[in-house]
Every structure is written in structure tokens, then in C-alpha cells.
Image (spheres, rainbow, N blue to C red):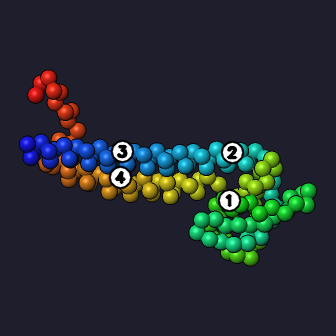
Amino acid sequence: MAVGRAARVRQIAAIALVSIGATVTLLAVVLVIGAYREDAGLNSRAVRTTAEVLSVSFDRTLVRYQTPDGADHIPPDGVGYPAGLQKGQLVEVEYDAAKPDLVKVAGRGAYLSLMPAGTLILFLWLVIGPILWWMKRYGPLFRPSPSPATS
């Protein structure tokens, strides 16, 4: 009975690890696809202007820029692809003419999301893979449970 219990625990742990790995991989891929779709929409109606960097924090970088109608905009979600920006800096940005609060640093795009997402996926599976391999040394991980009629 103890051998059956240990095998069942290993099977549940393996299913959990594969499920976590697959879910995080899917989320990373969706994130990259979303970044490309948002960039495609913004690029189709992009307007370039100069913006002042107001604040830089971990979760967002705020900028202020003026649209041709004279209105000042400070997008609440911050600017896209803000790496390397500093408070007080003037930077070229592109914003969506239809939605002026959708803004990114000019010349930067969704391709910048490939490296972090790819690295996340790589290291995730570099951790999960050896754990599954180690667990497999003690017996098969994914064998079907015996049905009540055959036991």
C-alpha cells in the first residue's frame, strides 16, 4: 500500500509541475502576442512627439506630452518599453491618435518582450525538467490508474 501511495504522490506532483509549466508558458506566449497586437494597433495610427519623463518606478514610467490640439497627456498606465529612462529626460514617444493614453517610446516595440518571456520559459523548464527526470528514476510518472473493475 505504501508503494502505491508514493507512486500516486509522485504522479500528482508531476501533473502539478507540468500544469504549472504549461500555464506559465502559455501566459508568456500570450503576453508576447498581446504586445505585438497592441503595437500593430498603435503603429497604424502613430503620432510622434517629445515627452518629458515625470517619474520612474518599478511598475511604470510616467511621461507628459502635448497633442496637436494643445491638451497635455499623462497616461495613467505609463509609457511602453521605458527601459533606461530617467526623471526629467526628454524622449521621443509615439502615441495612438485615437487613444492618446496609449504611448510607447519611439523606435521600441514588442520585440523587446521576446527576451524576458523566452528567458522565463527557458529557466522554468530548466528547473521543471530535471525535477521530473529525478522523480522518474523511482518509477513511471504518468501511468493510468487501475479501474475499480480490474483491481
Q: Residue at x 31, y 53 (%)?
A: 128
Q: Which mark is residue 77?
A: 1
SS at mark 1 in the image: loop
Q: Which is more N-terminal, label 4 or label 1?
A: 1
Closer to the eye: label 2 or 3:
3
Q: Amino acid at mark 1?
A: Asp
Q: Are marks 1 and 2 in contact (CB under 8 Å)?
A: no
Q: Nearer the viewer, residue 90 or 141?
A: 141
Whole-number angstrom distance, CA of label 1 to CA of label 4? 31 Å
Q: Which is more N-terminal, label 3 or label 1?
A: 3
Q: Residue at x 70, y 58 (%)?
A: 104
**Left or right relative to 26: residue 151:** left
SS at mark 3 in the image: helix
**Quadrant of the image occupied by residue 124:** bottom left
Question: According to the image, label 2 marks what residue?
Answer: 40
Quick check: 77 above or below 151? Answer: below
Q: Are marks 1 and 3 in contact (CB under 8 Å)?
A: no
Query: Furthest residue to the top?
Result: 149
Q: Nearer the viewer, residue 10 or 151?
A: 151
Question: According to the image, label 4 marks what residue?
Answer: 125
Whole-number angstrom distance, CA of label 4 to CA of label 2? 30 Å
